[in-house]
Image (cartoon, rainbow, N blue to C red):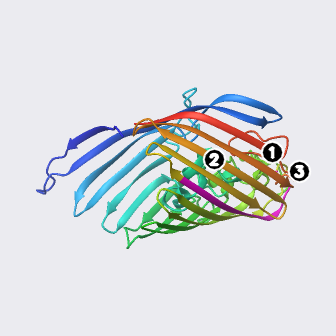
Amino acid sequence: MKKMMLTLALGAVAGAANAQSSVTLYGIVDDGIQYSTNQGGHSEINMQSGALGASNWGLTGAEDIGDGVKVVFRVENGFTTNNGAFSSSGYEFNRQAYVGLDGPYGVVKLGRQYDLSYLDGVGPLAAPIRVAGGLGDSPADMDNLFGDFNIQNAVKYITPDLGGAHFGALYGFGNTAGAVSQKQVLNFISTYARGPVSLAAGYMKVNRPATAVWGGSADAVANSAFSDPLTNPINSGYASARSLQIVDLGASYSFNPLVLGAVLTQTSYQNVVRTSSTPFSGTAIFRTAEVNASAFITPALYGGVATSYTYSDTAHYVQVDAGLKYSLSKATRLYLIGAWQHAAGTNSLGKSAVADLNGFVASTTNNQLAFRVGIRHSF
């Protein structure tokens, strides 16, 4: 991957040896053509940015301050390739913006960050990263294994390698005077990777998720108007939950070149408040079981398939994902990905469940099928 490096020599500080600082400009441009069978009752062919992950650009850097310790930082913004717009309005760096220290005892980062499971825990073992990008999300990405939301005001710590194991903890400050726990986030992971075996487990609890992570303008008040920040009928009726809890487990085994994986998640929307837009009250729990398989068919061609089953007391969703990725170079790949979802039961709004692949307009039936062919370049 070609990168632009800006290296600055720093002068001696208090008679100590010179340190060095580096800043790297990097990014991803991802675009493709997409077909879906039913969005709001109509099939559609359109251009869509960011199938394997959002187009983005950023700056990252490190300064060696001695004794094996580095100051590190990253600022990163997502954008839509087809019109050049920010993927989230109101944020100059909507994806990541942190600074921290990396040394012999682990790494500490402060700022806006992804939760631990997405990139450091179970996420790399699941279908979105291994098989089909955003099309491979669990229904509504309710377990956040593809990083649909970030954690603000966060302090994250990850241990150094401990014989193949890592442990991590994240705390997101609510930043609400007089209410320490309001909008607070707690997040933990443990991982193990040695030889052909990879294992991961994670836990996250978010208080007042509507405003803490989903971008809502205000928390819900019972039996009143509520501006629902979620649009997917699979979970939009639970946006007024007082807390969100996610537990995830993942494992994979490499048979070289074939890799088999399995993921289990449980997402709990707790103490949901009934409002004008969220008719449900109480607690709703979704459990998802996924198996996936992937392999390098040739040194340049990678393929994978996955299937998952998600269920609650009232709704059930079956999903099948597939993907092929062909590397033209170290920086550029072509891809063909697809997903099919089938819904049954009653959704979060108290209506008949319909299929709704994450990022799409909901189908008017219980089935939805989508394909995307595209190109992804990293710099």
Most common SS among magenta residues: strand
Where is residue 120 shown, x and y percent of the image? 48, 60
On screen, residue 31 versus residue 288, left or right, reads left
Looking at the rendered structure, the secondary structure element under dot 3 is loop
Q: Is residue 150 visible?
A: no
Seen at 74% across and 30% down, the residue is 44
State the separation of the CA atoms marked 3 and 2.
29 Å
Q: Quick one: quadrant of the C terminus?
A: top left
Where is residue 220 shown, x and y percent of the image? 75, 54
Q: Can you identify the residue that label 2 sits on?
A: 322
Q: Which amino acid does label 2 sit on?
A: Ala
Q: What residue type is labelled 1?
A: Asn
Tag nearer the camera, 3 or 2: 2
Q: Is residue 147 above or below residue 286?
A: above
Looking at the rendered structure, the secondary structure element under dot 1 is strand
Earlier along the polypeptide chain: callout 1 or callout 2? 2
Which portion, as a residue range, is magenta?
Answer: 278-294
| Location of residue 204 (image quadrant) | bottom right
Q: Can you identify the residue that label 3 sits on?
A: 351
State the separation of the CA atoms marked 3 and 1.
15 Å
